[in-house]
Amino acid sequence: MKRSQDEPASPEPRKRGRPARQAGAGGPGARERILASARGEFAERGYDKASVRAIARGAGVDAALVHHYFGTKEQVFAAAIEAAFAPAVAVPDAVFAAGPREELGARVVGGFFRIWEDPATREPMLAIVRSAVNNERAAAVFRRLLTRNLLARVAGELEGPDAELRVTLAAAQMVGAALLRYVIRIEPVASEPVAELVSRLGPVVQHHLTGPRPHGAFSQGTSGGSGRKASGGSGQERPGGSGRETSGGRGQETPGGFVQDPDSMSGS
């Protein structure tokens, strides 16, 4: 029996297997799209809430392709922040060659804030910080990258002992300021002009990097745990470890732990 010409043809039998991948799912640029999507996802949601599926969706690819290129979510994060961290890695070479050592702190802080103030590099840095403060795996990736690519290189340029400690303390000043300004957004740090922050943080970072080691060291009393001898050597710890004289020999610690001058307590 012949089928009428007006009768619709029967549909093609369904083929087995996975559906065809959408155009643009792979091919040239797929890896870069995945990294860009990952940086945006980690910046907005942090490590814990970001997912490989969301990263794939933002890049227009299958989740399987993300795993094919990078493996686990931790490996995606490491690859994404390593590319994003490249401008920060270039800072030491620029600042050490740019001028005298006496101005090193201001140049380091200025270069650090230029990265954060540029929208193109701020989002990846936000992804790094937000993820590292909330997730130990992300923090471990950040520590490895920071130690290997930045802190060790800067320490190698410094003279004198304790270079790694001094560099880490300088980094603590800057990362803390960035956390307050760009992540937590605490005022007035969040809206203060960058030049003002550089002028205030520069000397502190300069001291950590090139300044002398402080004379004397803080020591906590062993008897009772709350008394200590002043660094000038003239203070005397009282029995029991709870009272002490000040370095001038006049102040006396009250039961509440505050040091008062005898003259001020006399009411004159």
Image (tube, rainbow, N blue to C red):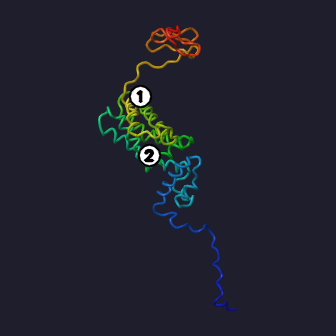
Q: Is residue 141 left or right of residue 205?
A: right
Q: In which quarter of the image is residue 240?
A: top right
Question: Where does the image place residue 251, in percent across and percent down from the top left?
Answer: 50, 11
Residue 21: numbered disc:
none
Residue, disc 2:
85
Few, some or many residues within 10 Å of mark 2 (<14, 14–19, 20+): many
Figure quadrant of residue 7: bottom right
- What residue is drawn where x is 46% and y is 34%? 172
SS of the residue under disc 2 = loop
- Amino acid identity at mark 1: Asp
Q: In this view, does 77 lie to the left or right of 17?
A: left
Q: Position of residue 211 (x, y in %)?
A: 37, 27
Q: Which of marks 2 and 1 is nearer the N terminus?
A: 2
Label 1 element class: loop
Q: How many marks?
A: 2
- Residue pictured at 43% horizontal, 13% vertical: 232
Is 129 above or below relative to 167?
below
Quadrant position of the N terminus in the picture:
bottom right
Q: Residue furthest front?
A: 268
CA gap, disc 2 to disc 1? 25 Å
Amino acid marked by disc 2: Phe
Q: Residue furthest bottom?
A: 1
Q: Residues within 10 Å of mark 1 (few under 14, many from 20)?
A: few
39 in relation to 250, above or below:
below
76 or 179: nearer the viewer: 179
Q: Does the CB distance between marks 2 and 1 fall below 8 Å?
A: no
Which residue, given by chain and number where applicable, does mark 1 sit on?
162
Q: Which of 74 and 48 is in front in this view?
A: 48
**Picture coordinates of residue 171 (x, y %)?**
44, 35
Is 217 in front, or is 196?
A: 196
